[in-house]
Image (cartoon, helix red, strand yellow):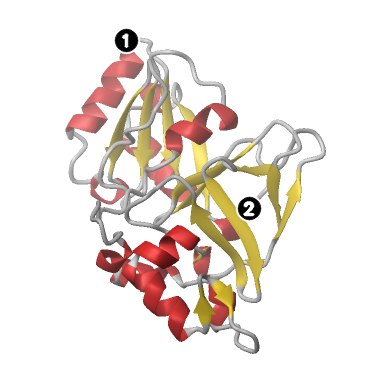
Amino acid sequence: MLSAFNTVPFYRERWALDGRTEPTLVPGRKGRHDGATEPELLTRTVVDLVPLAGGETRIDPARGLGRVLPTARRVRPGTLVVIVDPAVPTPPVDLPRGLRGCVVNPETLADDTSSGAVVELVSAVRRGEPVLVVGGDKDLARLCSALPQESAHRIDRLPHRSLSELDGGPYGVLHDPLLGYFGAFRECGRWHLDWRRVYARRTRSGLAFTLLTQRSPMLVDVLVDGGVRAEIRPCPRHGTPVVSP
């Protein structure tokens, strides 16, 4: 947080207005949301999330999938990983070695079942290669209904959930359009954070998340889903942070 306060225009201005300095709270002033920020505001001001030294301005909603995927589900070498989400424009770039990825826009499937990604998906299934599709329940159902029946029955599904949609699994990954993929449902029956790359803290407005390793655009104290009231606890089995509704 100190790095963001010192080097990123958005946080320097926002925290100063909220009564913060280096970046502790000034006595008697707590600011809005205990210093956290709504994602809509960050999206509108993404250019100010770039450090003074320069950096990327592109938000990557596919970020982190490669980190959480092995935790969420056993993936065989050679698997084609397909993200089915209209908000994800580009394939994931951090998949483990031996996997390849593509994206499908479910909103255009009815008019374009001959897109390169769909053709690659169907071809992979026909060759007997493993295929894993990742997305929301409705988008996954839309994709499967657009595929030939013999192909739809031979693909594996991995639903992604927003922080406000946590369920009992048995599979799933946590996703946010701004932060990307930041957690997964594990075999212990709990939603685990990607704690080496994502930090979460409680605020009066809900959980706020920080990407620890992304330097630009820098995302600090983001109120995912506008602020979800939940708990961060250590997993009794693994000892790492889990999200509990």
- Image position of 123 with respect to 205: above or below: above
Q: Are there few (<14), some (14-19), or many (20+) residues within 10 Å of tag 1?
A: few
Left/right placement of residue 138 relative to residue 119 reads right
SS class, disc 1: loop
> Residue drawn 57% across and 57% down?
163
Left or right of 54, for residue 211: right
In front of the other: 205 or 121: 205
Foreground residue among 169 and 114 = 169
Question: Residue 127 — which label?
Answer: 1
Number of the front mark, 2 or 1: 2
Residue identified by numbered label 2: 166
Kindly identify the amino acid type of the residue bearing the numbered disc 2. Answer: Leu
In space, the residues marked 2 and 1 are separated at their CA atoms by: 35 Å
Q: Is residue 187 above or below residue 191?
A: above
Label 2 neighbourhood size at 10 Å, few (<14), some (14-19), many (20+)?
some
Q: Position of residue 145 (x, y in %)?
A: 37, 38
As drawn, is 47 to the left or to the right of 1? left
Residue 212 location (% of width, % of height)? 49, 48
Which image quadrant: the C terminus?
A: bottom right
Residue 74: numbered disc? none
For the point 42% across and 23% down, which residue is it?
96
